Image: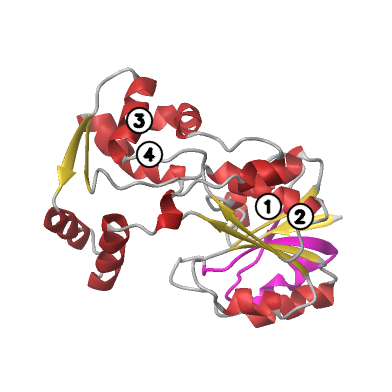
């Protein structure tokens, strides 16, 4: 059985590839830049562009399972080619698919639900632990982290846990038709995350809480559009309860506890030192 991982070079896709390889599966990693790919030994790397469905035909040859992302490679909204992709997948003989949710019930999700595929939807909390990499330069060079809404709560998830759940659903039966909400094992504020990083690097980090207007102005200087700014600020100012409610799905599906933020930091401490 060959499993195709789309978005294989991405933040989550790399972990899906790794988890499948560790499980002894035959993996085909799809990316728009195969020449720059760096995957474990034995992984077959192929070209494919989800916005150009016909480019997937060679990548789908002989594939029985697929991990599918639902957003364009540029990250600009939901992928619009879902119906074409799913039609090609079914013609190629794909039987099982995991879908990494983009936050909306878009064309990919709708096409998958309408198909005869054994599908599993993965709905992780929007806050990934790897988002903390955005803080790395400021922490490394200044020993300072400046963010608004310091008391905002979230149950951030390690991308490897998303990869583990995807791999389990692709390899094992019993996951068809399931929608899995995924979170990390703890709820943290920004200062608590800062303390975790401080302990790991062995030096104090000064947390500066920005006002909402300071945060908005910083985003404007970085080129963000006003609608994006409104969405991001609104989310952090008043996150939905689901963003800070821990659920045990990772452990239930994989048989292993979800990874902590401290574990993620220990794996990525070199970025902050």
Is disc 1 surrounded by few (<14), some (14 to 19) or many (20+) residues within 10 Å? many
Q: Nearer the viewer, residue 103 or 31?
A: 103
- The image quadrant where one finds the C terminus is top left
Rendering quarter of residue 96: bottom right
Task: State the separation of the CA atoms marked 1 and 3.
Answer: 29 Å
- Furthest-top residue in this view: 202
The circle on residue 188 is: 4
Q: Secondary structure at mark 2?
A: helix
Q: Earlier in the sequence, mark 1 or mark 3?
A: 1
Label 2 with label 4: CB-CB less than 8 Å: no
Q: Earlier in the sequence, mark 3 or mark 4?
A: 4
Label 1 with label 2: CB-CB less than 8 Å: yes
Magenta segment includes 160? no
Horizontal arrangement in the rendering, residue 208 relative to residue 3 (left or right) = left
Task: State the separation of the CA atoms marked 2 and 4.
Answer: 31 Å
Is disc 4 surrounded by few (<14), some (14 to 19) or many (20+) residues within 10 Å? some
Task: State the separation of the CA atoms marked 3 and 4.
Answer: 19 Å
Q: Residue at x 74, y 54 (%)?
A: 169
Horizontal arrangement in the rendering, residue 79 relative to residue 97 (left or right) = left
Task: State the separation of the CA atoms marked 1 and 2.
Answer: 6 Å
Residue 15 in view in this figure:
no
- The residue singled out by tag 3 in the image is 272
Q: Secondary structure at mark 1?
A: helix
- The image quadrant where one finds the N terminus is bottom right
Is disc 2 surrounded by few (<14), some (14 to 19) or many (20+) residues within 10 Å? many
The circle on residue 166 is: 1
Q: Residue at x 50, y 33 (%)?
A: 260
Rendering quarter of residue 100: bottom right
Residues shaded magenta: 44-72
């Amino acid at each position: 059985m060959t499993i195709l991982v789309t978005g294989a070079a991405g933040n989550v896709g790399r972990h899906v590839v790794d988890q499948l390889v560790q499980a002894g599966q035959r993996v085909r990693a799809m990316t728009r830049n195969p020449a720059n790919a760096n995957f474990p030994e034995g992984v077959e790397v192929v070209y494919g562009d989800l916005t150009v469905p016909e480019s997937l035909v060679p990548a789908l040859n002989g594939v029985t399972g697929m991990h599918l992302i639902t957003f364009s490679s540029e990250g600009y909204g939901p992928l619009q080619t879902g119906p074409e992709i799913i039609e090609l997948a079914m013609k190629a003989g794909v039987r099982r698919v995991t879908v990494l949710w983009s936050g909306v019930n878009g064309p990919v999700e709708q096409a998958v639900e309408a198909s005869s595929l054994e599908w599993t939807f993965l709905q992780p909390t929007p806050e990934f632990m790897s988002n903390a990499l955005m803080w790395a330069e400021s922490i490394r060079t200044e020993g300072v982290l400046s963010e608004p809404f310091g008391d905002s709560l979230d149950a951030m998830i390690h991308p490897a846990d998303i990869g583990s759940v995807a791999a389990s659903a692709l390899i094992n039966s019993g996951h068809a038709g399931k929608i899995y909400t995924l979170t990390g094992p703890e709820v943290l504020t920004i200062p608590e995350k800062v303390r975790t990083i401080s302990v790991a690097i062995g030096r104090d980090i000064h947390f500066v809480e920005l006002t909402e207007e300071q945060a908005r102005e910083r985003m404007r200087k970085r080129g963000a559009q006003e609608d994006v700014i409104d969405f991001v600020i609104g989310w952090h100012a008043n996150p939905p309860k689901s963003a800070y409610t821990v659920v045990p799905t990772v452990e239930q599906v994989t048989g292993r506890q979800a990874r902590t933020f401290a574990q993620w930091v220990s794996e990525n401490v070199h970025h902050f030192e």
